[in-house]
Image: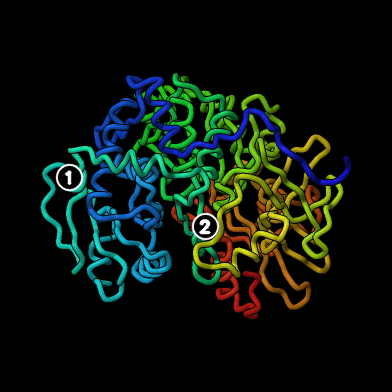
Amino acid sequence: MNDSYARGATEPALIEQTIGDFFDAMVARQPEALALVSRHEGVRLSYGELRQQANRLASALLRAGLQPGERIGIWSHNNLAWVLMQIATAKAGLVLVNINPAYRTSEVEYALNKVGCKALVTMPRFKTSEYLAMLRELGAARLPDLKNIWWIDAPGAADEAGPDIATDRFSQLLASGDAADPRVAQVQATLRATDPINIQFTSGTTGFPKGATLTHRNILNNGYFIGECMKLGPEDRLCIPVPMYHCFGMVLGNLACLTHGSAIVYPNDGFDPLLTLEAVQAERCTGLHGVPTMFIAELDHPRFAEFDLSSLRTGIMAGTACPIEVMKRVVDRMHLGEITIAYGMTETSPVSCQSSTDTPLERRVSTVGTVQPHLEVKIVDPESGATVPRGQPGELCTRGYSVMHGYWDDEAKTREAIDAEGWMHTGDLATMDDEGYVNIVGRIKDMVIRGGENIYPREIEEFLYRHPQVQDVQVVGLPDRKYGEELCAWIIPKPGQQPTEADIRAFCQGQIAHYKVPKYIRFVDAFPMTVTGKIQKYRIRDQMAEELGLQAEKTA
C-alpha cells in the first residue's frame, strides 16, 4: 500500500475490565510484590498495602457524600495521595479531574467550575504556589459546586486556614475510611469500562483549556500497551519524575506499571535532576521516563558521573520532539539501550505511536515508532482531507479505542477534533515511511512558510543540535514583510560555552539551504515551558515579535 495509512496489531485482545477490577486481579496474583516507592515521603508499599490504602480512600470518599459520576479534583505534584486518588476514584466511580499545579487563581476557578467539581484534594503549597491561599481568595461564592477541600498534610503538620468551604486534612479523610464501606465493592461491580473516569485539561495556546474526558477503557488499555512496548514485568522498577497531573505520569507511568506488576518510583514531588539520579541508583531502577529537557538536565548535571545507572534498561522519552543527538547520549551514557519513544496527545489517552525496545536505534532516534495495537493512523492533506502518499507530510489522524469520550460539556469543540468517521485530528504534521514508521515534523501551526518554501522548524533544530556548543534549541517563524516569515532560533549554550551568532551561521553555511538559516539568533538561559516540559513556542514568537517591533500578525 502506497498510502500513509497503518493499522496496529489485534493481539493481545483489548482489556474490557475497569481499572479497579484489573488492579484487584493484579494484587491477587502478587500481593507481596513492591508496588510504590515515594522517596521524598519515605513511603514503600506492596501491592496488597497499596490496595488496602486505596480501598480506605474509596470508602472515605463515598462516606463523605460523593456519588458515582461526580467530579473530584486533584491539584498536586507527585506523591502517595495522587496515586491513591487515581485508584480509589476508579473504584468508587468518581471522575478524577487533574488540575495543573502551575494554574493560578482564574485558571483553577475556570477548571473547577467548568466540570462542576464537588470536592478537591490539594497540596497546601509548593514553592511559590500557595494553593490554599488561592482557594481562600476565590471562596464559596466563586466556586459554587465545590463542597469539600482536603489538603495533603505531612505527619505533624500545623493546621492550615482554608477557604469558606469545608476544609480538612487528607490524613483525616483517609482515617474516616478505616472501617471498609460495603458500597465500594457494590459500586465497583456496577461500573463499565466505557464509563468516563478522568478529565484532563489540554493546555491550549489560545482560548480556555478544554477538558478531555477519558474512560477506564481509554487509559487502562493505553497504559497496558505502553508497558508491553517497554517489555515491563514484576521485576521492573520505573523511575517517574514526570508529573502525574499529565497523561505522561499517570498513564505512561502509573498505569504502565500497575498493568504489569512493576514498581512505581517517585524520586520527588517536582522534577529535580539530582534526586532523579539518586533514586535510579538507590532503587536500582530499570526504567526512567522524561521529556528531553529532563534527560538533558540529568546528563549535564555536574555530579552525573558519580551515579551508577547500570540497572537502567528502558523508559520513555516523550512530551515533545526528541532530539536525535540527545537520544544518542541517553542510550550511550545512561545505559538506556531499550529506551522507547512515544507519541500522542491527551485526547488519545495519550499514546498512538511508539517504538519498541528492539526497534533499530537509527529508527528509534529518528521516528516515533509505529502505530499501537488496536489503533489506526493515517496522514492526510490538511486542506483536502485525502490520505497522502508515503513519505509526504500531512496531518496525522488516529482512530480506535484510545480516542477520548469527548471534551467535557463542549460538543462543538469535540466535533471539530473528531470527525464523523471517528478520526481524531491531531494538528501535528507527520510523514510515514514504507515500513510504517511515523515521524513528526512539526505542528501545522508551527510550519514556517518563507517566500513560498515550507520549512519545518524540527529539521533546523535537529541540525543545530549537532553544534558542539549547543545544549538545546528552538526554532520559530516570525512575521516578515518581504518573505512572509523568517526563522528565529533560541539557543541554550552548553555550560561554560559562549557561541556567537557568527559561529552558528558558519556552522550552517553550505550544510543547509540558505533559506533555512535562521535570520534571528538569540542565546538564552531557558525556554518558556508548561509544567510538563512542553516548550511554548508561541511565547517565544510573541516575545521576539515585540522585541523586534515586527507587525502584529503573529503566527500563533
Q: Is residue 190 left or right of residue 429?
A: left
Mark 1 neighbour density, 10 Å: few (under 14) some (14–19) many (20 or more): some
Please identify the residue farthest to the right as the structure is shown: 2
Q: Which mark is residue 268?
A: none
Q: CA distance from mark 2 to mark 1?
A: 32 Å
In percent of the image, x 48 and y 52: which residue is there? Answer: 196
Dot 2: what SS?
strand
- In the rendered view, tell whether residue 295 sits above or below residue 344: above
- Foreground residue among 266 and 70: 70
**Can residue 496 be seen by looking at this rendering?**
no
Dot 1: what SS?
loop
Tell me the amino acid under the disc marked 1.
Ser
Query: In the rendered image, which residue does mark 1 sit on?
Result: 176
Tell me the amino acid under the disc marked 2.
Ala
- Foreground residue among 74 and 59: 59
Residue 540: where, in percent of width, then height? 56, 64
In percent of the image, x 71 and y 48: which residue is there? Answer: 507
Mark 2 neighbour density, 10 Å: few (under 14) some (14–19) many (20 or more): many
Q: Which mark is residue 212?
A: 2
Q: Quadrant of residue 129?
A: bottom left
Residue 390: where, in percent of width, then height? 84, 45
**Quadrant of the snapshot with the C terminus:** bottom right
